[in-house]
Image: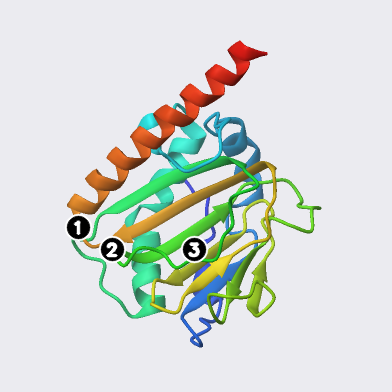
Amino acid sequence: MTALPIDIEAFAATPLVREPFAYLMVPNFVRGDAMAAINADYPLVTHPGSFPLPTLQYGPAFRAFIDAIQGPEFTHAVEEKFGISLEGRPTMVTARGVSAARDGQIHTDSRTKLITVLIYMNNEWEAKTGRLRLLRGPDDLEDMIAEVPPDEGTLLIFKNEPNAWHGFHAFEGPRRVIQLNWVTDMGVVKREQARHRVSAFFKRLRGKSVQEAM
């Protein structure tokens, strides 16, 4: 049996923080011996924004990684940790490669998303900005519960509750993030993928127009 590229044992051993909303962080969740191949096969994302995996091209090591985070072992571990049933709940995965100055505004996720997983795929992060903060409210990035270093292989997972505020100080440049959500139903996946496809089309079109104008 092929070893998974993710450390489910470390995930299971990490205590869940329950207040003010349920979350946990796992450094090195992506196994170190798998990281180089996954990053080599990471989709080329040159524009800001989230891109659904069906709109991207990537290699087999990245595919195996995505299969693992959507697989039964990790799903069961998430159910156990959060005391939630994810049976019949579809998943949706997007990838980011670049952060724009406008990104990072304080928000909560759509209520159609039950659980949010963020996995960072950057080398050691040296910038002071671009670090996701979990917040006590919607008004102040300094009023934080925790700050997530967007280092290679770090996982953040939280239950999408009405007070699950998060955001980061603006950063412009490469910032690789995988987002996995369990959502309420397949209609959400179809709507979100259609929305992201349209958004991705115009982002690429704007990028092409800028290049042609240079």
> Which numbered disc, 2 or 1, marks the residue that appears first in the sequence?
2
Quadrant of the rendering where the C terminus is positioned:
top right
- Label 1: which residue? 185
Q: What amino acid is labelled 2 in the image?
A: Thr
Cα distance, mark 2 to mark 3?
A: 26 Å
Marked residue nearer the N-terminal end (2 or 3): 3
Q: Are marks 2 and 1 in contact (CB under 8 Å)?
A: yes
**Distance CA(mark 1)–CA(mark 3):** 25 Å
Q: Is residue 41 left or right of residue 152?
A: left
Q: Looking at the picture, tell me which residue is in the foreground, 148 or 74.
A: 148
Q: Position of residue 16 (x, y in %)?
A: 51, 81
Visible residue check, residue 1: no
Between 73 and 214, the one nearer to me in the picture: 214
Q: Quadrant of residue 94?
A: top left
Tell me the element at label 1.
Answer: loop
Residue at 67% across / 70% down in the picture?
A: 147
Spot occupied by residue 175 in the image (x, y as percentages of width and height): 64, 45
Relative to residue 149, is residue 13 depicted above or below?
A: below
Report the mark closest to the observer, 2 or 1: 2
Residue placed under numbered mark 2 in the picture:
112
> Can you say whether 19 is above or below 113 in the image?
below
Label of residue 213 in the image: none
Q: Residue furthest bottom?
A: 19
Q: Which mark identifies residue 8?
A: 3
Left or right: residue 85 compared with residue 95 = left
Q: Secondary structure at mark 2?
A: loop
In the image, what residue occupies the spot 54% across and 18% down?
208
Amino acid, disc 1 = Asp
